[in-house]
Image: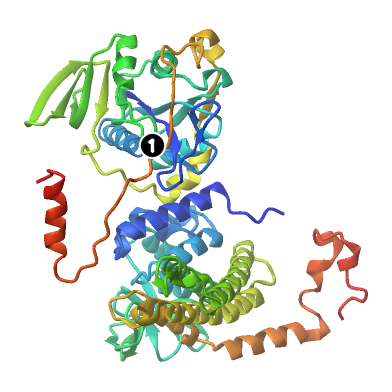
Amino acid sequence: MKIAVCVKQVPDATAAKRIDPETKRLDRSGEAALNATDLNAVEEAIRLKEAQGGEVVLVSLGPERALESLRKALAMGADRAVLVADEAAAGSDLVATSRILAAALEREQADLVLFGQASSDGDGAVLWAAVADRLRRPLISQVAALTTDGSTVTGKRQTEHGYDTISAPLPAVVAVSDAINEPRYPSLKGIMGAKSKPQETLSLADLGVDAAEAGEAGSRTTVLALGPPPARGESLKIEDDGSAAQKILDYLVERRLL
Amino acid sequence: MDFTFTPEQDALRKQARDFLEANPEPSFAELAELGWTGVSIAEEAGGVGAGFVEEAVLYEELGRALYHGPFFSTFALALPALPDDLRAEVAAGTTSWTLALGPLVPDLDTADRIATVGGDGIYELEGAEREVLTTTDETRPLGVVRGGTVGRRLADSTVLEEIATRSNAALAVEACGVARRALELAIEYAASREQFGKKIGVYQAVAHPLADAYTQLELARSLALWAAWCVAEGDERARIAAAAARAHATEAAVRVCETSIQVHGGIGFTWEHVLHRLYKRALWIQSFGPSTTRLRAEIAAALLEGGQVFHVPDLRPEHGRPDPALAPTTQGG
């Protein structure tokens, strides 16, 4: 079975975030990492491959340097990586990104396309739906357990009230939740061998995507404003002299929070 | 020459740190799952075929995490003596080793098998009684072995020099890992703890010792990584580089830990705080095997041997330093 996993390079969780006031885009020049919840999708793909054989291909859209982060997933056990890196794709919104990824996935013709829950920078959690729609394939989202018999895929979707068990014929798109597994640590051998695995960098032209349909030109949304979270407002510091509990209670009651 | 770590070595360090933070007490089998137990073992013997620089990355991170287990004793002490079939078992994570070089043997509580030096060779010691002693550093206890029978001959005693070199380099790098964590804790504390209405880091009595500690650690780490590189490359200077690195790094680690304890004030003395464990590991490294005085005597002997000044070759233009101002006017010898 051929499994494609869509992954994204995001700013490292520990790094301070900066927003470029000119472009209103997140400054991505700092320390980067592979999006944490994408690792769940990579892990699940590798487990399926280990159980049933096949190939795991990483598909990503991002700058050239995103290859560094893709290597972590290659070290975990993915077989090869396809990165769409094109200046014209910078600033793509959901609509443009899904168009580019769908084109890359069409080229791969995978039986199963896996996504993580959401990216830690965009936090949209809708890209998988848009890609599935463009590919005209069934979608199961928020999947906490996944099985496949080679012709159908069955996912247990986590909901507020319990689980929905949903089956879909392959080829299909599945977005996994972070409850599905515990991503493995890459082995030393995996780390040493990751660089020599096939890594392909494609341009929009390679995929037959018109530059006018990508990047800001191909986006249907416009970012009007983007700013750091507001500084925390007034805070009250209580030195505990035995009456702290009462003071906290009074504070909460005063603001009708209790 | 490029002395930066490769992306793979950086990835290994990051992975090692993440893993050890999440799993502070991994078993030898868990390390095998990560492939660490095959690090510098050749691929033909079931290993990963990486080099001593990768192994050094692991010593540094394991030191930082105060790992309690037979990694040091297996790789820095026993490995050079092990034939390929036994190396394959180590790589697979099924057997760990320690080596009785002197009366006090490390990792007797965790190592599976024991090698011992006798006459002109290194042999397996079978069926020996082990007594693990109560030592200051609880994370790497020492013990004594009694009785037992001499088993398979593992190697010629000529490997003892390689063992000394590898263990000196390994302990130097490990000392840097220990010291780094102690320094980070001190910096974090000095930047958050307030006294007289200010963060204590603004006071010179705190800031200056921290700057000294940082300087010592960075120098020690440069030496230690150079030694690791020499070992990895089979460079002829490896023995002396490792001795120099160990002599400097152990003393630096002890001083950095002492500085950190001072900076921490009262809390640095408490049993619950990790600092005393780091300090004790630094003291362990200082006390195990040759003393720093002994190491310096070895370095001096090598420097003066045959009238060759040891470091001169580094400064010759053909060794990548073309600046004529730096070239020695008279060659040593």
* Up/down of A105 relative to A27, above or below: above
Residue extending furthest toward the right: B329
Residue B301 visible in the snapshot = yes
* Up/down of B9 relative to A101, above or below: below
Q: Residue at x 68, y 84 (%)?
A: B299
Question: Which amino acid type is shown beneath numbered disc 1?
Answer: Asn
How far across and how far down the image is residue B130, in percent? Answer: 28, 86
How far across and how far down the image is residue A221, in percent? Answer: 41, 15
**SS class of the residue under badge 1?**
loop
Residue A160 or A4: which is nearer the viewer? A160
Q: Residue at x 49, y 84 (%)?
A: B286
Q: Quarter holding the N terminus of chain A?
A: top left
Residue B305 or B316: which is nearer the viewer? B316
* Up/down of A208 relative to A8, above or below: above
Corner quadrant of residue A230: top left
Residue A112 visible in the snapshot = no
How far across and how far down the image is residue B75, in percent? Answer: 45, 69
Corner quadrant of residue A249: bottom left
Q: Residue at x 40, y 77 (%)?
A: B264
Q: Residues within 10 Å of mark 1 (few under 14, many from 20)?
A: many
Residue A110 or A131: which is nearer the viewer? A131
Indicate how the structure is coloured in the image: rainbow
Tell me: B310 left or right of B174. Answer: right
Tell me: A217 left or right of B315. Answer: left
Corner quadrant of residue B138: bottom left
- Write down the chain letter for disc 1: A
How far across and how far down the image is residue B103, in percent? Answer: 41, 91
Determine which residue is flagged by label 1.
A35
Q: Residue at x 45, y 84 (%)?
A: B283
Residue extending furthest toward the front: A254
Tell me: B128 left or right of A243. Answer: right
